[in-house]
Image: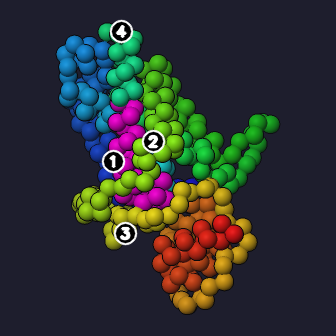
């Protein structure tokens, strides 16, 4: 199992947020303000510190949290490739807002001035574990000292490490993220049909971010699969529908890898791309139609 092509190919929104979280964490660390970012009852309900509400979810309070958090965010870029940048942007903001409301409600109910929640994008990270659990298939299984593992186990272990990094301070925001993930999956208020306008997400592709290995500067930041059904996590079995192989050009490896990262069989992905003249949107529709038969 992998997150698809290396770098941020077809994941420009994820790239923007990962860099923003990293830079903001470094900035507040230099200012020696990392320990003051977490939400507390004192800040929210007595000082009415709105600045803290807006910034608490954008910076981690320690280097280990930053490392595990950015690793998970980088891996979860696979979801942007699956549903497209426009819909994934809605998922990001929905997760962060719901988890923030959960934290505020929790502080109000507990009313403990000494309780400070961990800062950082816990809502976004742990909401992503919901589609990761339900939609990403296991590709390999193995045993270590008699204990069964899968290739997904390493992502779960990284998430567990982050969740327990500050004990209750990090567990509670993490649970808020899981709640947000389930609400999104339940399609609360029809949230899964919503998407940002094209010009909003295309803005990220025009930003002069430093290039990462495997990232394509010409990759579209819009929906790769603009209106495709929800990812089912099941690889295509058998052959794709009979289509004329109108392109003799070998499909690009990154296009094949993108389809494979969605759970499709590599050979079927290659056939579909050749029949679709290497158009990844058309190839995806061919594979999804084959999956429905």
- Rate crowding at label 4 as few (under 14), some (14 to 19) or many (20 or more) other CA atoms within 10 Å: few
Locate residue 225 relative to residue 60 in the image: left or right: right
The magenta stretch is: 79-100
Q: Quadrant of the C terminus?
A: bottom right
Residue of label 3 = 219
Q: Do the residues labelled 4 and 3 touch (CB within 8 Å)?
A: no
The first of marks 1 and 4 along the sequence is 1
Q: Residue at left 20%, top 29%?
A: 51
Q: Is residue 109 magenta?
A: no
Identify the residue under disc 4: 112
Q: Distance between the residues labelled 3 and 2?
A: 31 Å
Q: How far apart are marks 1 and 2 (CA)?
A: 24 Å
From what the image shows, is residue 245 above or below residue 138? below
Q: Name the residue under label 1.
A: 17
Task: Rate crowding at label 1 as few (under 14), some (14 to 19) or many (20 or more) other CA atoms within 10 Å.
Answer: some
Q: Residue furthest right?
A: 146
Q: Is mark 4 on a helix, strand or loop?
A: loop
**Image point 49% across, 50% down: which residue?**
75
Disc on the earlier residue, 1 or 2: 1
Q: Quick check: 204 above or below 125?
A: below
């Amino acid at each position: 199992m992998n997150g698809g092509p290396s770098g941020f190919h077809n994941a420009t929104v994820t790239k923007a947020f990962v860099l923003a979280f990293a830079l903001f964490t470094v900035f507040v660390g230099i200012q020696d303000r990392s320990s003051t970012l977490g939400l507390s009852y004192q800040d929210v309900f007595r000082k009415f510190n709105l600045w803290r509400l807006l910034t608490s979810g954008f910076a981690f309070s320690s280097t280990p949290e930053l490392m595990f958090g950015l690793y998970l965010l980088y891996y979860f870029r696979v979801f942007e490739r699956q549903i497209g940048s426009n819909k994934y942007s809605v998922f990001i903001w929905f997760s962060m807002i719901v988890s923030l409301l959960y934290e505020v409600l929790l502080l109000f109910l507990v009313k403990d001035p000494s309780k400070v929640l961990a800062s950082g994008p816990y809502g976004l990270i742990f909401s992503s574990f919901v589609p990761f659990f339900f939609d990403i298939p296991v590709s390999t299984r193995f045993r270590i000292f008699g204990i069964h593992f899968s290739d997904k186990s390493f992502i779960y272990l990284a998430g567990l490490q982050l969740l327990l990094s500050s004990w209750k301070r990090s567990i509670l925001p993490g649970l808020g993220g899981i709640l947000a993930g389930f609400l999104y999956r339940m399609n609360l208020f029809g949230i899964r049909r919503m998407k940002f306008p094209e010009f909003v997400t295309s803005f990220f592709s025009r930003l002069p971010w430093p290039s990462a290995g495997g990232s394509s500067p010409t990759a579209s930041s819009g929906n790769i699969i603009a209106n495709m059904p929800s990812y089912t996590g099941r690889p295509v079995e058998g052959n794709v529908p009979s289509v004329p192989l109108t392109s003799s050009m070998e499909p690009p490896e990154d296009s094949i890898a993108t389809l494979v990262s969605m759970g499709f069989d590599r050979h079927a992905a290659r056939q579909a791309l050749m029949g679709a003249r290497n158009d990844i949107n058309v190839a995806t529709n061919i594979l999804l139609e084959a999956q429905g038969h």
